[in-house]
Amino acid sequence: MKIVVNTRLLQKGNLEGIGWFTYETFKRITRSHPEHQFYFLFDRPYSDEFIFSENVTPLVYGPPARHPFLYYIWFEWVVPRVLKKVGADLFITPDGYSSLSAKTPILQVVHDINYAHYPQYIPFVARKYLEIYFPKFIKKADRIATVSEFSKQDVIKHYGYDAAKIDVVYNGANEMYGPVSDEVATLTRKQYSDGKPYFFYVGALHPRKNIINLLKAFDIFRATTKIQMKIVIVGKVYWWNDEMEKEYKKIVHKEDIVFVGRVETDVLKNLLASSLAVTYVSLFEGFGIPIVEAMYSEVPVITSNTSSMPEVGGDAALYVNPFSVDSIADAMKDIYYNKDLRKTLVENAKIRRKEFTWDKSAERLWQSVEKLMTKTGK
């Protein structure tokens, strides 16, 4: 088969959640299936590190699709021409966006439909694009893969898509994540938290990620316990807005909040594994990869009782109401004071994490491909 893959989010040094999904699954799929030819479609110059095997042919066609107007040009004009030019048997689009003009069978990966739940957090033009086109993408798709059962049911509920044509393909965690030695943990704390223990967050500093409630909860934790702790925040500040800034200025213990920005994976893994707990209290997630990264790092997790997060965390996380600052603060206290709770969560995680590996993700995604191609007679 000739398979064209939308790889526009494979950007050197700038892989986010969906980019990692694309990277990890197709690194395995292309190497495991040398009998097929894969065409990786980039919208800008690519790095050779993304050409995983000899059966991968890179294709670069602009314009860079980073704005709704350019999304339309790239997906509706460029993608169909490329599919026709190479004689593609299948188009796989791992980032949720698709092409209404393509004549080739489409496997669409849907990570979440957060725009339908929290439209207020999406810029106006991008929101309008999604509201108009995303339902059409779903209807157009010949088969869909989602990253959680929650997202699968969300797609069914909102768009009435046939459940029999949706496959759940869980995310995994980077193989670099794991526990660190006491020496590494001590050095990491010395460098980033003045040697003090710390809570940890990694992700975009986006309103939907609930950063302000997390910081308010930490402020309460510090004020009521007097414990000398910090919270380390890793992630881009791109989405930080005026309302978030206003609320942040009200926080008393600002000196104990450490904004690190974006860091490389080798630094990130040490930061995560050296923390007392990961605090991932997002309002809405289609999966929540940091939960699994914490499991592999053998660090307890505080996360939300909403959307997909209980599905991912299982019995290996402590759940909070993300809309309640007191709920988050209480969980921080429970984690800090209750050593047995921390130990139990970590032991449960050692079992739970086996469900989330990139090998399994790649296998499940390929099974989805096989189901679609069997139906089309390829």
Image: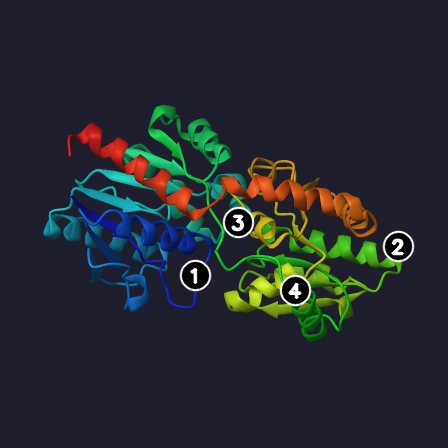
Q: How crowded is mark 4: few (under 14 residues within 10 Å), some or many (20 or more)?
A: few
Disc 4 designates what residue?
A: 181
**Residues at circles 1 and 3 in contact by the CB criterion of under 8 Å:** no
Q: In this rendering, would 20 be left or right of 313? A: left
Q: Position of residue 197 (x, y in %)?
A: 76, 63
The residue tagged with tag 4: helix, strand or loop?
Answer: loop
Q: Distance between the residues labelled 2 and 4?
A: 31 Å
**Front of the two marks 3 and 2:** 3
**Front of the two marks 3 and 4:** 4
Q: Which amino acid does label 3 sit on?
A: Ile
Q: Which of 293 and 120 is in front in this view?
A: 293
Q: Where is residue 102 in the image (x, y as percent from the top left)?
A: 20, 43
Which numbered disc flags the more N-terminal residue, 2 or 1? 1
Disc 3 designates what residue?
A: 289
Q: Residue 224: which disc?
A: 2
Q: Residue 15: which disc?
A: 1
**Residues at circles 3 and 4 in contact by the CB criterion of under 8 Å:** no
Q: Residues within 10 Å of mark 3 (few under 14, many from 20)?
A: many
Q: Distance between the residues labelled 4 and 1?
A: 27 Å
**Residues at circles 4 and 1 in contact by the CB criterion of under 8 Å:** no
